């Protein structure tokens, strides 16, 4: 039986949801990651950047844009133990500036994804996957990348059916 790892970065501070800025107690991407785990099992790993992104939504997006423009690789506090033991890697992130936050790039460049099955999923508020899947393919060229799932942040709490359908299609 293949071993599943659900890796995600989630912003649990101010977020843009359904046309307004709200404070989230649990980040949207974490909600989806936990739902995936409850369906397929496996381990979860939350990416924790060394420097937290700002609490305020607009300041956070400014930092994210600067990191993208400068092609930065923010340091990550934690590591995955025994990464080599996992076959299926679910990669979750919010869509920031039409791709993944740059801390996800750091993560993807920190491990050997050769022959790993990658299942991308993202949360967004209207921009879908953007170019994130193409970026994952560039960063992990020797992996097997499956169809991705995009869920609106405003709909994560009601996304069980969409997640189950996606998992049935890709696994």
Image: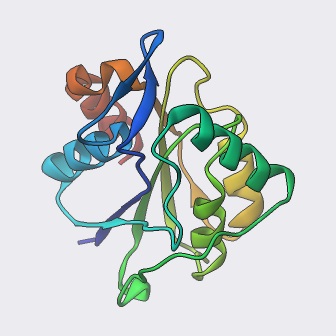
From the viewer's perspective, tell me whether residue 93 is left or right of residue 67. Answer: left
Q: Position of residue 89 (x, y in %)?
A: 43, 64
Nearer to us in this view, 114 or 46 = 46
Q: Please report the residue visible at 86 percent of the width from the left and 58 percent of the height from the top.
A: 70
Colour mapping used in the image: rainbow
Check the picture and name the quadrant holding the N terminus. bottom left
* Residue at 46% across, 79% down: 77
The front one of 11 and 163 is: 11
* Placement of 32 over or under 78, stated as above or below: above
x and y, in percent, of residue 117 in the image: 49, 63
Residue 78 image-quadrant placement: bottom left
Q: Which residue occupies the extreme right position in the image?
A: 70
Outermost top residue: 19
In the displayed structure, 110 sits above or below 32; it is: below
Q: At which x and y percent is residue 80?
A: 39, 82
Residue ID at (57%, 81%): 111
- Above or below — where is 97 with respect to 70? above
The answer to whether 113 appears left or right of 85 in the picture is right
| Total number of numbered discs in the rendering | 0
Residue at x 57%, y 71% (from the top left corner): 107
110 sits left or right of 117 in the view? right
Quadrant of the rendered structure where residue 79 is? Answer: bottom left
């Amino acid at each position: 039986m293949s071993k599943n790892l659900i890796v995600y970065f989630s912003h649990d501070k101010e977020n843009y949801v359904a046309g307004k800025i709200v404070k989230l107690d649990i980040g949207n991407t974490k909600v989806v990651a936990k739902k995936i785990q409850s369906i397929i099992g496996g381990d979860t790993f939350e990416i924790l950047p060394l420097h937290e992104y700002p609490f305020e939504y607009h300041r956070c997006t400014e930092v994210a844009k600067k990191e993208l423009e400068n092609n930065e690789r923010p340091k990550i506090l934690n590591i995955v133990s025994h990464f080599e033991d996992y076959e299926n890697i679910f990669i979750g992130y919010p869509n920031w500036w039409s791709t993944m936050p740059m801390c996800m790039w750091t993560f993807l460049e920190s491990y050997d994804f050769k022959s790993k099955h990658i299942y991308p999923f993202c949360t967004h508020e209207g921009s879908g996957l953007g170019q994130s899947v193409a970026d994952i393919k560039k960063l992990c060229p020797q992996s097997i990348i499956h169809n991705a799932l995009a869920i609106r942040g405003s709909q994560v709490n009601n996304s069980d059916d969409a997640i189950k359908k996606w998992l049935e299609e890709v696994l």
